[in-house]
Every structure is written in C-alpha cells, then in structure tokens.
Amino acid sequence: MRLPIALIGAGRIGRIHGANASADNRIELRYIVDPVAEAAAGLSAMTGAQAVSLDEALDDKEVAGVVIASATQTHADLIERIASLGVPIFCEKPLDLSTTRARACVDAVTRNGIPFVIGFNRRYDPDFARLHALARDGALGNVESVQIVSRDPSPPSLDYIRASGGLFRDMAIHDFDVARWLLGEEPDEVSASGSSIADPAIGEAGDIDTALITLRTPSGRLCSISNSRRTSYGYDQRVEVHGSLRTARVENHPETRLLVSGDEGRTRSGIKHFFHDRYAEAYRLEMRHFVSVIMGSETPRTTVRDGLRALELADAAAQALKEKRTVQIQYVR
Amino acid sequence: MRLPIALIGAGRIGRIHGANASADNRIELRYIVDPVAEAAAGLSAMTGAQAVSLDEALDDKEVAGVVIASATQTHADLIERIASLGVPIFCEKPLDLSTTRARACVDAVTRNGIPFVIGFNRRYDPDFARLHALARDGALGNVESVQIVSRDPSPPSLDYIRASGGLFRDMAIHDFDVARWLLGEEPDEVSASGSSIADPAIGEAGDIDTALITLRTPSGRLCSISNSRRTSYGYDQRVEVHGSLRTARVENHPETRLLVSGDEGRTRSGIKHFFHDRYAEAYRLEMRHFVSVIMGSETPRTTVRDGLRALELADAAAQALKEKRTVQIQYVR
Amino acid sequence: MRLPIALIGAGRIGRIHGANASADNRIELRYIVDPVAEAAAGLSAMTGAQAVSLDEALDDKEVAGVVIASATQTHADLIERIASLGVPIFCEKPLDLSTTRARACVDAVTRNGIPFVIGFNRRYDPDFARLHALARDGALGNVESVQIVSRDPSPPSLDYIRASGGLFRDMAIHDFDVARWLLGEEPDEVSASGSSIADPAIGEAGDIDTALITLRTPSGRLCSISNSRRTSYGYDQRVEVHGSLRTARVENHPETRLLVSGDEGRTRSGIKHFFHDRYAEAYRLEMRHFVSVIMGSETPRTTVRDGLRALELADAAAQALKEKRTVQIQYVR
Amino acid sequence: MRLPIALIGAGRIGRIHGANASADNRIELRYIVDPVAEAAAGLSAMTGAQAVSLDEALDDKEVAGVVIASATQTHADLIERIASLGVPIFCEKPLDLSTTRARACVDAVTRNGIPFVIGFNRRYDPDFARLHALARDGALGNVESVQIVSRDPSPPSLDYIRASGGLFRDMAIHDFDVARWLLGEEPDEVSASGSSIADPAIGEAGDIDTALITLRTPSGRLCSISNSRRTSYGYDQRVEVHGSLRTARVENHPETRLLVSGDEGRTRSGIKHFFHDRYAEAYRLEMRHFVSVIMGSETPRTTVRDGLRALELADAAAQALKEKRTVQIQYVR
C-alpha cells in the first residue's frame, strides 16, 4: 500500500513538492490543503489529490506524513499541532521568523519524537552533496574557508519583502545552512555589511538587497557569503571550499552547452534562471528523502535543529549589521 | 479522452519510450508487445499498460498510434502492416538495413498517407535544435562545414555487431542524419576510412570500430564525422557548424559542475555516460512530438524519407570504404 | 639619447624590474645599487648596468629616473632623498609600513612636484585593465559589489612575516588598491576576520594567514577580499565586478590549454604559479608606463596617494580585526 | 664569444626569427640579407645586425649558422649552397613546392652532414609538446585517432595563393607534420575533399579554401584535418589525440581571461588572432633549439626529412582530391 501524504500549501513551492510527491510511487498524495480554493483545486487537478480543509486532512488517521509549504507565519502552529499527532513532518524553511518560536518547534518535535525534515534544498543538490562529501572524506584536507555566492535574478515584491523577516532570514538562511554544513563546525562569530543599492525602495521598506556576511568558527575557519537580490544573468549559485590539500567549487548550471564564436567573442548561454530550474533535481531528491524518512529507511539529513541554527545565524547577522560589530553567538542548546 | 497507444518492443529503448509515453497525459499507453514475456511484463508493471500479442494490440481499433522499438529486422514488416491499417507510426532508427526495404517503407507510408516519425533523437535535443536554428536563421552566415564527433563509451557485444549492419548503418546513421540536417543540403559525395583498432575482434567480425567519414554537398559544403565504438571518458557527442559569420558548437554534457583544484591540476567530472542520460530530454521531446503529430498539431520533424536518406549515405560510406574512392550518390527519389 | 635610469634593489623584484627596464629601448639602465655585492653583480651582468653605490648613482646628474625595489624599511628615506633631487621615482609597494611616514612621502613628492609611480602591478595587467574599463565605461551599469580572491601558493618565511607589517599591509595591500580602483569610490567602512589556520606558526609570529575583509563605500558599494597565504594549486587571482547591467570577472591564468579526459574526469593544467609568471606582462607594462611618465607622455596611473590610501585601509582592517568591529575611515587628506 | 648568425629574408617571418635570434645571448645576429633594401634596413635597425648581400654573408667564415626565411622558391638553392659550405641551416617550411627538389635538399644535407632544422613551429609550442609527450609516454594508451582543426582568420592575397602551391602545400603542410608526429607512425593512405566556398575567387585561381583531409596509417590509426582559409573568430588551432586510455586535446588560446555575464549570455574574449601571437612562444623556442643544435647540445627535432615527408603527404592529398580516390603512398626513402 502507498503511504498517504497531505500537502499544506498550493503556492509556488507547494506545486513543486506536490509534483514530486505525486511522482514517488511509494506514497499517495492524498490531500491538498490551501485556503485559496483556486490554488488547491489547480494542484488537485494536476496531482489527483483531494482538496480538503486542514481538519479533514489531519482527521484521516492513515496520513503518514505532512508536507508544510504554506506561508511562513503558519509554520510554527502547524508544526506544533502535527507533531502532537505524532505524524512525520516535512517543512519548508524557515521554521519561523522568531528564534523563540523556532525553539518551541524544536521542543515540540523532540518531545513527540517525530521524524522531521526541514526543506534546505541545497543539501540535496547532487553537486553540493558531492562537494560536501569531498570536504568530509578528507579529499580537500582541512577545511580553511568557504566562499558562497548566492544571488537571485530579481527582487520579490515589496509586500513580500516587508513580510519576509529581511534578507538574512528570508534569503541568506539557505546560505547559513550551507555554510554550517560545509564548514563542519558551528560558527561563533558573525559580521555583516549591506546596502540597498540595487533598489532603493527596498531600503525604504527597511531591508537591504546586497550583503556580505562573514562567519568564523572556533578553530578559525572562515566563510564569506555574497548575496544580491538582483542579477542580470540568472540565479547565481556558487560555492567554494578552500582546503589545505585541494580547493573545490560548484559552478553555475548553464542553460545550454552551446558555444558561439564570432568577432564579438565566444558566447555561451546564460545560466539557469531561478531556483525551480536550478534546484529541480534537489527538490525531487529532498521529497524522496522525506518519504524514505517516513518509511524508516533514512534518518533526516536536514533536521529541525538545523532550521533553528540557521535562524540564529540570521539573527546574529542582523544584529551585526545594525551594531556594526562582530557578534559572538552563544548557542542556548 | 486520452489517445490509446501501443508500444512494440520492451527492451532497452522500448523502456525509454514506454516511460516517456506513460508520462504524457495526452495519451494512454494501452499495450506493450514483446515476444519476451518477462520484458513485456516488466514494462507493463512499470507503466500500467497491458502486455498483449501484436494481433491483440492491432485489433483494437481505438489504437491511435504505434511506437516501434523492436529489433531492426522486424521494422519494415511492422511499418507495412501498420501503415496499411492507417495508424500513425513512430519507428526507431533504422527503417531497415536494406535500402530496398527502406524504400518500400517510404512507399507504404506515402501510399497510406499516415503520419510517420523516425526516431532520430538528436534533432529533438534542445542544444542541437538551437544549433540548427542558428544555422537556419542565418546567424552563422553561410554554412561552410560541419564537424561531428560521435563516440560510444564501449562497443556492443560481437553478436550485436554481427547483426547490426556495420558501424555506418548502426551507429553513424544518427550522424548522417545530423549532417544532412545541419548542412541544409543533400550530400552527393561520400568518402570514408576506418579500422578496427579499438578491438581487433570487431575486425574479425567484419566490421570497424573507428571511422572518419567525409561528406560534400553540391555547393561545396563539407562535413566530417569522427566515430569510435570506445572512449575512456563517456559518450562523446560534439557538433560544430562553421559558418561565414560565426562558428557554433554543442559541447559535451558534464555529469556535475564541480571543479577540484590541487597540485594535480584542475579536474572536472566526466561527461554523461551514454545515450540514455545524454539524450534523456531528447527522448522525452521526441515522444511528445509524436503525440502532437498524432493529434495533428505538428507535422513530422523526422520523416520516413529522412530514414531512407541516412541509410543511403551509410551504404555509400560502406562502398567508399571498400573501394577506397569517393562515391557519388544519385538519389533515386 | 636613451634616458639613464638607476635601479635600487637587486633582489627578486629588482631583477624583474631590471630585466624590463633593460628591454625598453627608450632608456638606458645605467646603475644597479644593492648593498649585497653579489646581487648587484648578478643583475649587472644580466643587464649591462654598472653596480655602484647609492651616492654614485645619485651623483650622476643625468639620471632621469630611479626605480626603488629595495627593502620596505628603506623606501621612505629614499623617496624623500630622491624627491628632493627632483628625480622621477618608481617605488615598489608599500610606501612604508607606517601611515605617518607614508604621509611624509606624499608630502615630499607633492612639495617637489616630481612624477611618482607606485608599483601596484595589477592595474597594469591587461585583463584587470579591461575589467576596469568595462566598469568605468558603463558596460556593467552601476557597480554594486566587487569580489576579490587573492591567494598565494605558499607562505613566505617566518622572518619575512615578522618584518612584513602583517598580511594586511604586506599582501592585501594590492587588493585594497584593486578594490578602490574598481569600486570607483573611496571605502569608508572596513571590517575583517582572520585566523592562522594554514600554519599555526604564523599565528605564533603574531600574524594571520587567512582573512576575509569587507569594505563599504558611502553609496553602498560592497567589496569582499578573500586572502590566503597558501593554496595547493598556484596563485589564485580572481576579481569580479557585479554591476546593475552585467557582471564581469577575470579568471585565473592556466599554465597550458591542454585538456585530458579519462575515467578520472576531465583534467586541465594548474594555474600560473606565482606573481612573476601571472603578472609578467603587468610588470612589463608598468615599467613602460614609468618610462612614459618620465618622458612626459603619460601621467601616473598609480600615484603616491594611492600608496597611502591602500595603507590606510590596511591599518583600518588591522584595527577592525583586533577590535572586532566595523572601523570608520576618515581620510585626513 | 657569441656565435655569428646570418638571416636571409627580412619579411614577416624573417622579422620574427630576427627578433628571437637577437634576444638569444648565445649568438650574435651578424647579418641580414634581403634584396628589398628597405626591409633589410628596417630589421637591421631593430636588431643591430648588418644588412649585407648574400655573398658577403656567406664569405664570412665565422658564420656558424644561417636562418632561411626568404621566399619559398629560393629555399632549395640556398640549402644546397649553404650545405655545401658545411654551415648549419634553419629553414622555414616548405623546403620547396616540388618533391624532387625537396629530395635533392635532403640529399645535400645528408651528403654534407650538416645540422638542419625545418621550421615546423607547432612542434615547439609548449602545449603541443606536452600533448606529444602524453601520447609518447603512454599516458593516452594506444593512439587510435588524431583530429586537427587548423583555420586561418582570413585568406592571403590571390597573388600569394597563386604562388603558394595550393592549400595543401602551403597551409596544411603544418598539419601533415603535426599528424605524422602525433600519430607516431607514417600514414600510407590519404584522401581529401575540398571546395572554394569561403571565397569563389580562390576557386577561380585554381585553389580551394576549405578542406577535409583523412590519413590512415598501416596499423589503422586515423587522422582528420579540417582546414579553412577564413574564420570569423581568429586563428583556430585545435588538436586532439584519441587514445585507448585517455583523450587529450589542445584548445585555442584566448586573448583575455575575462568573462562577462548579462542577459545576452556569458561572453569570453576571442582567441589569439593569428600565428604570430598564437605561436610567439613556439617561434622563440624553435630559434633557441636551432642555436642549441648549432652548439651541439641538441639534435634537430624537426629534420629535413620531416620537411620532405609533409610535402609528400601534401602531394598525395592533391592527387586524392583531383582523382576522388584514396591515394596509397610509397615512400621512396
């Protein structure tokens, strides 16, 4: 029998998870929950799952897992409720915009002993995973520094930005997770610089669109993160690990492998445009992982605590930016 | 209602077409036909289609299209029989190993007026398609020459080779089609050189494993094809069009975008290993095209006559190799 | 008549300048000055210039220019003495390790009105110069951020490090200059993080071997500098300018253009090993520029004030590292 | 004492050799010989050598070597005369346009036992030399095929073409030499196809501008040569050796290492424009080799017989093109 699964949220990211869940023949995507009836109906038509209310979905005791892909402010409540039912959870990042609530989520998951996977998709990308394996297997020697370039093709709407918790919590949160994962050690110092040079309206909304973040771990490993909300050339996702023996990097993914030579030079295609095409395979593997976790054949590769740690780093970066100083992090637990 | 489709052949290539057909929600893959019961049952389980006999499949008057992916020697008979029923056909290359039979296939298709798509998958590869568009749109200027490198990772079994019709009809046939397509003009001169240097056993079986083929068109366009049955580095598929204004090429597809730098140099991953991963997207688009052809929204991009022409070039190359001279081609029709 | 020139310093960098000066047929490299008689004699033999004492060289009133390539602690005295003679000066970086002395150098040069070129070689590198031209000409749009990776293949001796003024003043000083030049605006905020993770002995000597530096300009342009004293793969010199319209970067220079493909992947040669081969052309063009400045046909592209500004940034970075805060820079003049 | 050398020919290629010879401090470039007084005077001014007549140069019994860089039709006479004097010779390719005369040159060199170096510059290119070393050292396994792409940026004048002996003897001659060198075995079968598609006037002058040449060796190694007199993107010089263990290639040399990304794609600079910049280092090393040969510390890497063999392949290709058949070569000696 296929395990019945419910998906909460039928927006942009919900549709990605819905498509991947319905293609995994170990499960049955049984329910779609979304207050926007049209969105729920659309994804229902696409996947064959039923559009129902949250209560209806959670009342079905056969439901073996829930995928949370709804708005950020709903995450913590949903996690606490579903955890109390003992049902495995996949939750999109971030857990919450408040570390207090995020800690409560960690507690709820721990107390109820449920399997929980946070949606840090990049760890599931095959290239990133190989880079991590090289770092962990010693092929690079001792990891000395990590360079992350992470830039979106274009800024989201100002409404989105105002509700986002800011660039650090909304966008850089992925990079904080990648940094922790590749550094192999918890950063305890954070500094940050930023500006709203790409779009002054973002500055007026109280946020930045361009940032440089520096992390340092107790053993002296360094990490730089370069963020921008806007490029002219697609979704710029590069990561480099500088080790004592070798340095390895993941380069951008081009749209084609065509090279045109003329008197204007040698031109290749642009790179993948945004997260849905650059990380399509990562999303697929992430959902497969969640199903394996539900089935007990794998343990969570991205945990609820990873979700909390990334948020703590985002908070520290925000404080560092504001106070123009290096912030020391003391992890509570 | 979804159009019912039958698939003949559940081997390596049949499974690719079966998976793509069953993922296209405009059609219903209704039947699998394969004399090897296990193969038919396996693909049936994977796709939900029924494993039936050929007669059963063709007796169903609702069947709106047939995909022929069975052994080469069955193609011509199947084409003639299915064409006489007025049912659209997708057929894997080659039509047949004999140009006489291939011409009969062209006649059968023409006489019955059925839609027919030959499986020259490379034309459906997005990179090759963009290269062709550049050549046709004039971005490259006048096409002066085409360079094709087409090498397999490892030779097939000697049994396969003995039944294959030889490297030109079995392997280079794809390249002959790509050459015709990119040259934009029918080649009328062919010369060839070859050897069995990669594996002498192939020579003892009467075939070659390494070849250089040269084509020339009436206006003086030249094309070189470099074939090998064996590389140490994967499936080498490069094409370059040298034009009067620009030169464009399709490069190999790497397995990852990881770069490792150390004192041994800068190392990238190998390239895609073989046709099923390198041309996965092409196979998908090819099947989608066939469904669109059945539905009348597209006309065949790779026709039965394309299948014949490529075979005629293969025959000419074989003759050129044997007689050590440039062979002039006179196309009968 | 060829203009007579004197070169002070016949060490590693002196030999580079000596070779380039003797190949420029607009000048005559007349004198070599070095307290180490063997070094002076060696370079004298190589170039045909006379090995003399400093006084002898400066007593020759025909000397039209002096190249200072001696130890750092001699620079300021030499600059003041030669400037007072009204003789044009080319001086290797840094002016001095103390900003007070560096300011005195600026004063001496200004007061005496002599042409002065500081040896920030990277501005003369053809690739860097093209990148700068793209940024200045508007091809990139508004410059939003600059990323500099600058890593040496291996650390210098501990004796060198102890006398060097530290990584910021000795090594990053080039990067501070490149940053100012490409940002097109004077940075007024500096933060820094560092460690001696590559070689703990460097830490015991009071210095760091790995650093991340962040600069910010008044309009919000950001710059990150990633330094390391040790790579496993040569001299890593990459610079990227992220603009509102386009992003451009200079990539490393490979030693060969050979690509080897096998089952181990696709391997290219390593990159140029160190500054003398990576920047060979820059050193040549830099010396040609100095000769043109002497002859009055060009004005200094790298000025004595550029030397001071880079040093002020190095001081600010050292303070930021020590005090773990963002340091605001107020330029005295 | 520096060895006195004479240079015959002060044209384009003579100036390259003259500059390299005058920079080698083991020799003294003593004489320049050119019937065009202005050319001789110009190179004399540049190098400090005396412009003299041929007789004057050869009457100087101290002359230890002669560089022949004059017009092709003068080569054979000069070789015979200088060889009879027992003086070492460096001669630009080709020996002559007639194999009969070329054989006479081989005889003259052999009979007089003089050191002789033919100017096949590509063998001295560091990248080509490394590729050859990989092929010879077994790193590639058994060499199975060689692919050469060799294209000029623009055709020479029609006058040049009429006197050139045709594309095979004038341009492809370098490629025939590279082919022999990399194949490691003497080709005994040649076929060729060609057209004047880039410039019909070249066809009217009796030559071709685009060619595909195929070589085969007795053990079955294959080689393809793709030539064009005209690209839109510089001097296209690529060579690939396909071996049983690995495949290695030399790629084109870019003018810069700049990459610009925008919505138009990712653009790199063009490649080196023509032979003088692409092979600058090869010309330098070639001349150093000749000096070492004169001094007895090296034996000729490119011999007079190599000059003859390449010409024999050119003749065979011309015959193959004309007779539309594969030509078998029987080497006389």
Image (cartoon, coloured by chain):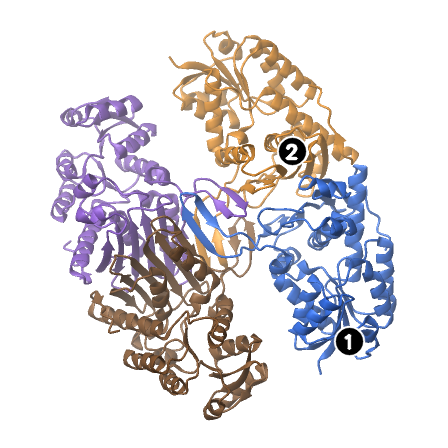
Chain colours: A brown, B blue, C purple, D orange
Q: Residue at x 57, y 21 (%)?
A: D303
Residue at numbered disc 1: B64
**A317 relative to A241, above or below:** below
Q: Residue at x 45, y 8 (%)?
A: D62
Q: Amino acid at mark 2?
A: Leu
Quadrant where the image shows the N terminus of chain B: bottom right
Residue A20 vertical position relative to residue D7 in the rendered view, above or below? below
Is residue D267 shown left or right of residue A136?
right
Badge 1 density bin: few <14, some 14–19, many ≥20, Cα 10 Å: many
Q: Name the residue carrying label 2.
A: D158
Foreground disc of the pair 2, 1? 1
SS of the residue under disc 2: helix
Q: Can residue C29 be seen?
A: yes
Q: Inspect the image, locate mark 1, and give the three-letter code of the amino acid beneath it.
A: Ala
Residue closest to the eye, A319 or A93: A93
Quarter of the image with the C terminus of chain B in it = bottom right
Residue D181 image point, x, y percent:
59, 30
